[in-house]
Amino acid sequence: MNRCQWCGRVPSGFGMVVLTIKEDEPSQSLCRDCYNEFAANMLGIEDYKDFEKEATFIDCDGIEHRFQIGKMINPTGICWEAVEFIGENKIGYSFEVHQDFEEDSNDALERLYKKIKKGLSKKFIRKEVVQGQELISIKENVVEGRIEWDDRYDDRTPKFIIDGQEYSLEEFGRILMSCEGWNFRLEIIEPTE
Ligand SMILES: [Zn+2]
């Protein structure tokens, strides 16, 4: 397991940040806390640390989801993230909001919490068992989710995280076959939107 080169700790689920301070010096592998402290000093802003690092929410089916809450201080603002780590290299639900430096971190966190609640308040995929067979279909003709790289394939094959669950391209294609012959509209949305 990689340790942070500054504090020696093994990082949380969010992993490491690779930092290059000077071009001719080797880059360093840092935990998020050390990176954020460095970035805050450099940008002359406060490194707000007084927030819950973990939060549990319940979705519309009564299922619990535990999120790790973290942030990344970027030159353009702060990115707050709530990520549901569900196994090695596996992420279920994931939510992000952007905070401008002028905004209060607590307000940004409130927006993040609201976004989580909204995200968990409805599901897009319906699973039912009909005569012993599992049928998976789209609930109301709209699907929202996240596009990720499917590392089971060498090339650029996506997978889709919908309702916090993974669907391969093939599985998602099969779901779409319940709408064979229909038209569709695809819209790509930034994670902080
Ligand atoms: Zn560290």
Image (tube, helix red, strand yellow):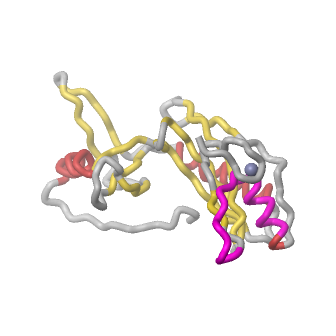
8 shown above or below 19? above
Residue 152 drawn at (x, y percent): 31, 47
Q: Residue at x 60, y 35 (%)?
A: 66
Residue at the location (74% across, 70% down)?
Answer: 100
Q: Residue lying furthest left in this view?
A: 181
The answer to whether 61 appears left or right of 13 in the picture is left
Looking at the picture, tell me which residue is in the foreground, 133 or 160: 160
- 6 displayed left or right of 114: right
Between 150 and 114, the one lying in front of the other is 150
Instruction: Indicate the quadrant where residue 42 lies.
Output: bottom right
Q: Is residue 154 above or below residue 152?
A: below
Quadrant in which the N terminus is drawn: top right
Q: Is residue 37 magenta?
A: yes
Q: Is residue 16 above or below residue 88?
A: below
Q: Is residue 124 left or right of residue 119?
A: left
> How far across and how far down the image is residue 118, in percent?
57, 49
Say how many tags the image has. 0
Residue at (80%, 59%) from the top-left corner? 37
**Residue 97 position within the rendered picture, expressed as x and y whole percent measured from the top left:** 64, 60
The magenta stretch spans which residues?
22-41
**Quadrant assignment, res 34:** bottom right
